[in-house]
Amino acid sequence: MQGRLWTPLSIAGYLLAIVLILAGLAGNLLPLIPTAPLLMAGFILYAWLDDFQRVGWGWLGVLLVLSIVMIVIDFIAGAWGAKKMGASRQAVIGATLGAILGIFFNIVGLIFGPFIGAAVGEWLAKGDALRAGQVGFATWLGLLVGTVAKLSLSFVMIGLFAFAYFI
């Protein structure tokens, strides 16, 4: 960054932008961390600190569209698997609670929390263990597909930002 005066405040700003982007990446795997807004906040802050010299509003607009797609995927993915199996409302609530509680049980909880939550919710609603297992699996599969899609979009967004910044 030729000609740019580095001050403690500007360095702190760039570090904050990087932390926001990394937190956005973490949000792909951790429930309750808003992936797309954190990524966008990091991109906008980084671009603003550079006076939008390298990454302008056009690039940020493209990243915003991808962020909106990511948010839509986030809402649709988990429900898609549950709806595909005709899950009850309790199963959807259970999957959500399982995902949130799963945070406290490391990676195992993150992987199995939504499955267990959906299965328990469906079992409480219908009393059928086989059906509960099917709904739990379908919900888990939907969340997995959504997570992979969001993670892929996150890396595409970071790649586009880096491309715009360094070209």
Image: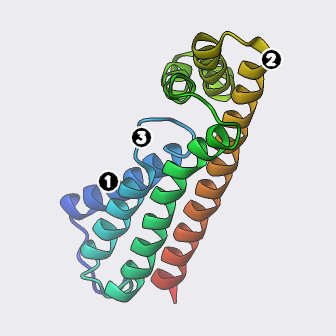
Q: Which residue is mark 2?
A: 130
Mark 1 neighbour class, 10 Å CA radius: few under 14, some 14 to 19, many 20 or more: some
Marked residue nearer the N-terminal end (2 or 1): 1
* Residue at mark 3: 33
Image position of 97 with respect to 32: above or below = above
Amino acid type at image mark 1: Leu
Amino acid at circle 3:
Ile
Question: Closer to us: mark 3 or mark 2?
Answer: 2
Report the Cα–Cα distance between label 3 and label 1: 16 Å
Provide the residue designation for mark 1.
Answer: 16
Q: Amino acid at mark 2?
A: Leu
Q: Residue at point 54% right, 81% down?
A: 163
- Compared across the picture, whether 69 is left or right of 40 comes to right
Report which quarter residue 159 is drawn in.
bottom right
Mark earlier in primary sequence (3, 1): 1
Left or right: 165 as drawn, with respect to 124:
left
Q: In the depicted view, which residue is nearer to us: 65 or 24? A: 65
Determine the CA span between mark 2 and mark 1.
48 Å
- Counting residues from the start of the chain, the first of labels 3 and 2 encountered is 3
Q: Disc 2 on helix, strand or loop? A: helix
Left or right: 88 as drawn, with respect to 19: right
Quadrant occupied by the N terminus: bottom left
Residue in the picture at 38% in, 52% down: 20
